[in-house]
Amino acid sequence: MGKKKTPIAQATPAAVSQIHEAVLGLNGAVRKGKAISQLQAEARRKAGHDIVVCGGELKENRRTAFLIETNANGVVKRCPPHPNAGPQSLPHFQPDPRPPEGHTFYETPNRKAL
């Protein structure tokens, strides 16, 4: 009988979130536009436009969204998907207090931008 080989642990690549321009659609849906950098996202948020952070890792999406909103607008608050916005709404960060308008949305495992 031969020796059993010990499996070699393979490193998994770190999750990377993608940032996109965003617009609101029907039923609270967030429609993603072209991909942008974090600096471009911060500038868009300062100007009151929506952005969305997309990717498969909730913690990374939330962290990236928080950093963008904080860098752009200082004090922020995290909001769950608003039921009155529609069934496809996403969680997000927004300035507290307002203005500017707009949101930094982020995807979750069950809620995605279109």
Image (cartoon, rainbow, N blue to C red):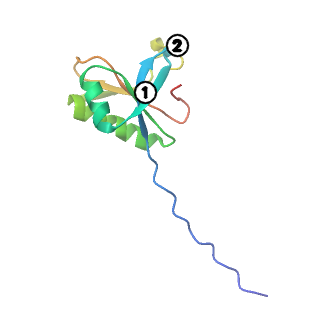
Question: Is 16 located above or below residue 22 in the figure?
Answer: below
Residue 94 appears at what percent x and percent y? Answer: 30, 24
Q: Visible in this render: residue 34?
A: yes
Write the residue at 36% across / 39% down.
Answer: 64
Question: Is 25 located above or below residue 111 in the figure?
Answer: above
Question: Is 55 located above or below residue 102 in the figure?
Answer: below
37 and 59: which one is in front? 37
Q: What element carries label 2?
A: helix
Residue receiving disc 1: 91
Q: Please, what is the three-letter code of the amino acid marked with disc 2? A: Asn
Write the residue at 55% across / 65% down.
Answer: 10
Could you give the CA–CA distance between mark 1 and mark 2, rounded to whole angstroms?
Answer: 14 Å
Instruction: Judge the density around disc 1: few (<14), some (14-19), many (≥20) Cα neighbours within 10 Å.
Output: some
Residue 6 appears at what percent x and percent y? Answer: 63, 77
Write the residue at 24% across / 25% down.
Answer: 46
Write the residue at 43% across / 39% down.
Answer: 18
Residue receiving disc 2: 27
Tally of marks: 2
Circles 1, 2 touching at the beta carbon (< 8 Å): no
Residue 75 appears at what percent x and percent y? Answer: 21, 29
97 and 16: which one is in front? 16
